[in-house]
Every structure is written in structure tokens, then in C-alpha cells.
């Protein structure tokens, strides 16, 4: 019997990926040149599909990297001369902040307790801030930033580039991409693909910032600078050989999601999340880690043990071929992280809930 994965990355594979992979090998996609017309067509189709799925405007490019983690580095190099501001409430938003420190910038941080959101009215963003780093969904703690708050911060601080981490939530949130400047995700979470591809959505404001930094003689990266990535994007190519197979598969999965419909995906995601949170409200030994319902993630539901340790729950579920994510970092032993991505079917969520109710 195969395992059912509820891990928040790598995650359950989207249902159609096996067939798409089989067809890709039959078409020898893995061997085509990234300078070929065949690849350009795959890239262009993937770009157009993502634009339609996420409602991305025409002034934004979509470029590919090896991972979302790489995009942290590209963003800081490309769009920050001195100062970025990072809203931190979990391990991954903290790592983005630390990336700016490692690149010898002068980042500022506004920190909330892990598992808590932000009161945006209390956040003062100075005029010297060049990049505002927001996280829609903190994978480590299951806390989500309301989309209205993201839009409000971006509109209030148009002097800065607003960068949005959507790694463990895209394509679920209904983001207005006319309000933010750049966003990014990786494919091994809600898009249900094997790891190895980062997707960077970026507008002309970011490109101009990078061009200005280069005119000043500042380092904005090496081979994969934003200006290089954008230059090749304009002809649907990449500076170096990319993960062609993953781009092909992403294109196919996006086509499948468009057939399902993004509003149906959002509704299904919310319905499954409600079942999980309802179960936690009535559980004897587990409770939701994020207490404020307005900040509870719909795509990564984090449960904490009232008794301290979850190892017996994890091992018990594993014996029944259900693989749930353990806590991240300091929360490893007393958190469960339950992925509620598109590939996590409702009947599987129901089976998981039934098992968890036995503990």
C-alpha cells in the first residue's frame, strides 16, 4: 500500500503528474535544448497559464530558478542597495532576513511571536526601506497574513518594492498583482510536483531598480542576475540550462488547475481546512497552534500537543501509511504540520481526521 503524504514539502504529488511524466519521457522532453523552439513554446505556454491562473498583469515577467530559497538571494542582490524590512513570524521569514544580513545589507526586522500575525497599523516603514518582505503563509508555523493586510501595506508604502513569499500557499490566495511588485513560490508544495524549480514573478519596477544598481557598479549577482533573467525571458529562454522537465510538468499541472477552476480550488481548500480546524477545536490532546482564526493558514494546518510530544501520533499514523509533517525547528517534537494542498484529496483528509480523533 502506498503512503498518503500530508507533509508540507516535499508534498503529495498532483494526481495527473504520473501520466504527464510518462508522456514527457515519450516525447524526450528531458533532452531538448533550452535554445530550441520546442522549449520556447513550453516556457511561453507555462507563462500564459500561470498568468491566467493567478491573474498576473502583462507588466510582470515569470522567470525560473532552482528553488524559492535562491530567489531570496536574487531579490536582495537585485533590489536592495542598503535597506530591506522583513516581517518575521516564523523560521522561513527569519531566514529571508538572515539572507539579507549575509549579503552584507542593512536589513531591519519587525518580529511577531511565532504563530502570531501582525497588527499592520502599528508597523512604521521608513522611507529608506527599499524592499518590504512579506510572507503570506509561514510554512514553519501555519500562520497566514490576510490578503487585505498585504494589499494595504503595499499601497501605503509604494516607495518600497513589496516582495511576497507564496511558497506554501500559491495558487490559493487571491493576490492583486497590480499592488505588489514581486512574488515567488516553489513547485513541490501546492503545485504537487517534485522539488527542483523556483518560480519568480517580478515586475518592471524591480527590473529598473536592478538596472540602476548595476549602473552604480554594484554587484547584483553573477550569471543569474535579474537583468539577465529578464533579458532571456523576453524570448522565452533562460540564461543557463534549466529544469526543462519540471517546467513542462508545471505547465501541464497549471492546465489541469485551470480546468478545475481557481475558485473551485479556493473553495475546496477552505472546506478541507475547516474540517481540520473543527477537529482540533474538539480534540482532547491537540489544538491549533495559531489561535487567531484570521491568521490561521488554509494550506498548512499546524496542530500542537497539549501534552508536549507528538512522536507517538506520527509513528502511529505512519504505520497506517499516513505521513504527516513534524514540527519545524524548536517545535519539532510537539507540532504536527498538516499539508492541505490541492493534491490532498478531501477523502484523504477525512481519513486522517478519523485517525487523529483516536488519539
Image: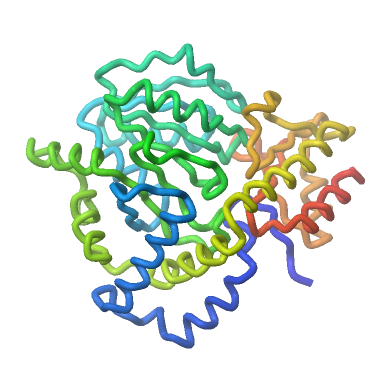
Which residue corresponds to the image point at 27% horizontal and 65% vertical from the top-left?
236
Front residue of this view, candidates 265 and 272: 265
Front residue of this view, candidates 300 and 317: 300
- What is the quadrant of the C terminus in the image? top right
Q: Residue 342 location in percent, x, y?
A: 64, 55
Left or right of residue 133: residue 336 = right
- What is the quadrant of the N terminus in the image? bottom right
Q: How many numbered discs sit on the rendered protein?
A: 0
Among the 4 quarters of the image, the one containing residue 155 = top left
Among the 4 quarters of the image, the one containing residue 33 = bottom left
Left or right of residue 355: residue 90 = left
Front residue of this view, candidates 263 and 113: 263
Return the residue found at the far bottom: 26
| Vertical side of 265 occupied by 127: above or below | above
| Vertical side of 333 occupied by 130: above or below | above
| Vertical side of 241 occupied by 189: above or below | above
Which residue corresponds to the image point at 44% horizontal and 49% vertical from the top-left?
55
Return the residue found at the far right: 358
Which residue corresponds to the image point at 49% horizontal and 38% vertical from the top-left?
92
Amino acid at each position: 500500500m502506498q503512503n498518503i503524504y500530508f507533509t508540507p514539502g516535499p508534498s503529495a504529488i498532483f494526481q495527473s503528474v504520473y501520466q504527464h511524466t510518462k508522456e514527457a519521457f515519450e516525447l524526450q522532453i528531458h533532452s531538448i535544448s533550452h535554445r530550441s523552439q520546442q522549449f520556447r513554446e513550453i516556457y511561453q505556454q507555462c507563462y500564459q497559464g500561470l498568468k491566467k491562473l493567478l491573474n498576473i498583469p502583462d507588466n510582470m515577467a515569470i522567470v525560473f530558478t532552482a528553488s524559492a530559497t535562491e530567489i531570496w538571494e536574487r531579490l536582495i542582490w537585485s533590489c536592495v542597495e542598503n535597506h530591506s524590512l522583513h516581517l518575521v513570524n516564523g523560521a522561513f521569514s527569519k531566514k529571508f532576513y538572515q539572507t539579507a544580513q549575509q549579503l552584507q545589507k542593512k536589513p531591519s526586522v519587525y518580529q511577531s511571536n511565532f504563530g502570531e500575525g501582525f497588527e499592520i497599523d502599528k508597523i512604521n516603514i521608513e522611507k529608506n526601506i527599499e524592499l518590504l518582505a512579506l510572507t503570506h503563509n509561514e510554512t514553519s508555523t501555519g500562520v497566514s497574513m490576510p490578503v487585505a493586510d498585504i494589499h494595504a501595506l503595499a499601497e501605503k508604502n509604494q516607495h518600497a518594492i513589496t516582495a511576497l513569499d507564496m511558497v506554501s500557499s500559491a495558487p490559493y490566495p487571491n493576490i492583486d498583482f497590480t499592488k505588489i511588485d514581486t512574488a515567488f513560490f516553489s513547485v513541490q508544495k501546492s503545485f504537487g510536483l517534485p522539488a527542483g524549480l523556483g518560480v519568480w514573478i517580478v515586475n518592471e519596477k524591480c527590473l529598473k531598480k536592478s538596472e540602476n544598481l548595476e549602473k552604480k557598479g554594484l554587484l547584483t549577482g553573477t550569471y543569474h542576475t535579474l537583468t539577465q533573467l529578464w533579458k532571456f525571458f523576453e524570448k522565452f529562454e533562460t540564461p543557463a540550462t534549466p529544469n526543462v522537465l519540471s517546467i513542462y510538468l508545471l505547465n501541464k499541472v497549471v492546465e489541469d488547475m485551470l480546468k478545475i477552476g481557481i475558485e473551485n480550488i479556493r473553495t475546496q481548500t477552505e472546506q478541507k481546512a475547516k474540517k481540520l480546524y473543527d477537529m482540533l477545536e474538539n480534540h482532547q490532546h491537540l489544538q491549533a497552534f495559531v489561535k487567531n482564526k484570521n491568521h490561521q493558514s488554509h494550506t498548512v494546518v499546524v496542530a500542537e500537543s497539549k501534552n508536549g510530544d507528538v512522536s507517538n501520533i506520527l509513528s502511529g499514523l505512519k504505520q497506517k501509511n499516513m505521513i504527516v509533517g513534524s514540527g519545524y525547528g524548536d517545535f519539532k517534537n510537539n507540532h504536527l504540520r498538516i499539508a492541505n494542498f490541492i493534491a490532498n484529496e478531501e477523502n484523504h483528509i477525512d481519513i486522517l481526521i478519523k485517525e487523529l480523533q483516536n488519539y
